[in-house]
Amino acid sequence: MRLVLLLALTGALAYGVWTLLGDGGDHPAQQLGEPEAPAPAPATGPRPVPRTVTLVLTVRTEASTIPQGTVAGYRWGGDDRVRPVDGRGRVTFTDAPTGKLSVIARAPGYEETVQERYLTGGVPTDAILVLKRPK
């Protein structure tokens, strides 16, 4: 009887050690799909310069009112990106690209106004565009 008890205790002890120390294979936590610890964050250097910037355009005319259908925006990469201005003649772009681009304004009965600007990442840019009637 003592031999059977000794063998049972030895087996239970061996199973416990094997379970705690592992057998080199998959562990129960991994089999259940529990996430592994995240990798440490990489060392960072200087913050990268943002690639977009806020651009606020204000359109004015020789008169005090802004004509219906007035739009303002920017020309970049050969494409115009314009939006209607609000009642005060303003429009805001929060995702204008950094670098050199043309800011533009158009309205029916007025000449298009174009200004060259250089937008710097992290620095909001304001521009005032004055529309003039054709001569």
Image (cartoon, grey):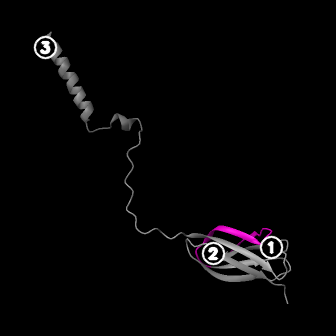
Q: Residue at x 75, y 77 (%)?
A: 105
The residue at which mark 3 appears reads as: 3
Is residue 11 within the magenta segment?
no
Q: Quadrant of the N terminus?
A: top left
Quarter location, residue 57: bottom right
Percent across and percent down for residue 109 are 86, 80
Residue 129 in the image: state x and y as whole percent.
74, 80
Label 1: which secondary element: loop
Residue drawn at (40%, 64%), measured in percent from left and top?
Answer: 44
**Circle 2 or circle 3, nearest the eye:** 2
Crowding at mark 1 (Cα within 10 Å: few <14, some 14-19, many 20+): many
> In this figure, which residue is indicated by the disc labeled 2?
125
Marks 2/3 in contact by CB < 8 Å: the verdict is: no
Amino acid found under the numbered disc labelled 3: Leu
Mark 3 and mark 1 in contact (Cβ < 8 Å)? Answer: no
Q: Give the magenta-colored segment's residue range.
A: 79-100
Q: CA distance from mark 2 to mark 1?
A: 20 Å
- Residue for badge 1: 70
Secondary structure under tag 2 reads: strand
Give the residue displayed 65% in from the left and 72% down from the top: 55
The earlier-in-sequence mark between 1 and 3 is: 3
Residue 135: image x %, image y %?
A: 85, 90
- The correct choice, above or below, for 12 with respect to 98 in the image is above
Picture coordinates of residue 53, whole percent (x, y): 60, 70
- Secondary structure of the residue carrying numbered label 3: helix
Under mark 2, the amino acid is Thr
Amino acid marked by disc 1 = Thr
